[in-house]
Image (cartoon, rainbow, N blue to C red):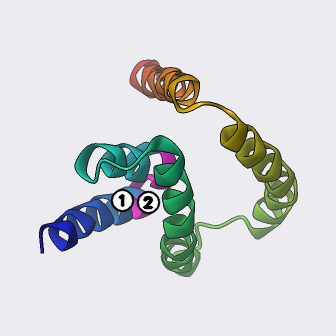
Amino acid sequence: MQALLFFAIIGILGGVASGLFGVGGGLVFVPLLTMLKKMGLHQAIGTSIAIVIPTSMMSTYRHAGAGNVDWKAAAWITAFALAGAWAGSGLSIQMDASSLRRFYAVFLVCVAAKLFFQK
C-alpha cells in the first residue's frame, strides 16, 4: 500500500511538471524514484523513460489542441533526438552509478541556474 502511495505521488508530480513545464522524466521522476522508492539510478532512469512516453503523449494532445505545437520543428528535432537518445542511453548504461549521479547533479544545477538567471 505504501508503494502505491509513493507511485501516486511520483506520478502526479511528474505529470503536472510534464504538462506545465514540458519536463518530467529527468527532472522529476528520476529524483523522486531514487529518493522515495530507493531505486538505483540506472533503474530510475530506465523507469522514467518508460513513464515519459504516455505522459508526453497526453501533454502533446493538450498543447496541440491549444495550437502550441510546431509540428515541423518537432519532426526535425525528433529525428536527431532519436540518435542522441541511442547514444545517451548507451553511455548511461556503461557509466558507473556514482559518476552518472555526479554528472546528473551537475546537469540539474546548470538547468536550475539557467532558468533562475534568465531574463
Marks 2 & 1, CB-CB < 8 Å contact: yes
Crowd band around label 2 with a 10 angstrom C-alpha radius: few (<14), some (14–19), many (20+): many
Image vertical order of residue 37 relative to residue 98, above or below: below
Q: Quadrant of the N terminus?
A: bottom left
**Percent position (x, y) of residue 92?**
67, 40
Give the side of residue 36 with respect to residue 64, left or right. Answer: left
Residue range highlighted in magenta: 18-26
Label 2 belongs to which residue? 18
Can residue 21 be found in the magenta stretch? yes
Q: In this view, does 3 lie to the left or right of 55?
A: left
Q: Which residue lies furthest to the left in this view?
A: 1
Please tell me in which quadrant of the rendered image residue 11 appears: bottom left
The residue sitting at 49% across, 58% down in the picture is 48
Front of the two marks 2 and 1 = 1
Q: What residue type is labelled 1?
A: Gly
Quadrant housing residue 16 = bottom left
User: Mark 2 belongs to which amino acid?
Assistant: Ser
Q: For the residue labelled by badge 1, is the local secondary structure a helix, a strand or a loop?
A: helix
- Mark 2 residue element: helix
Check residue 12 for magenta coloring.
Answer: no
Q: Is the magenta stretch mostly helix, strand or loop?
A: helix
Where residue 10 appears, as percent x and y from the top left, is: 28, 60
> Which label sits on residue 14?
1
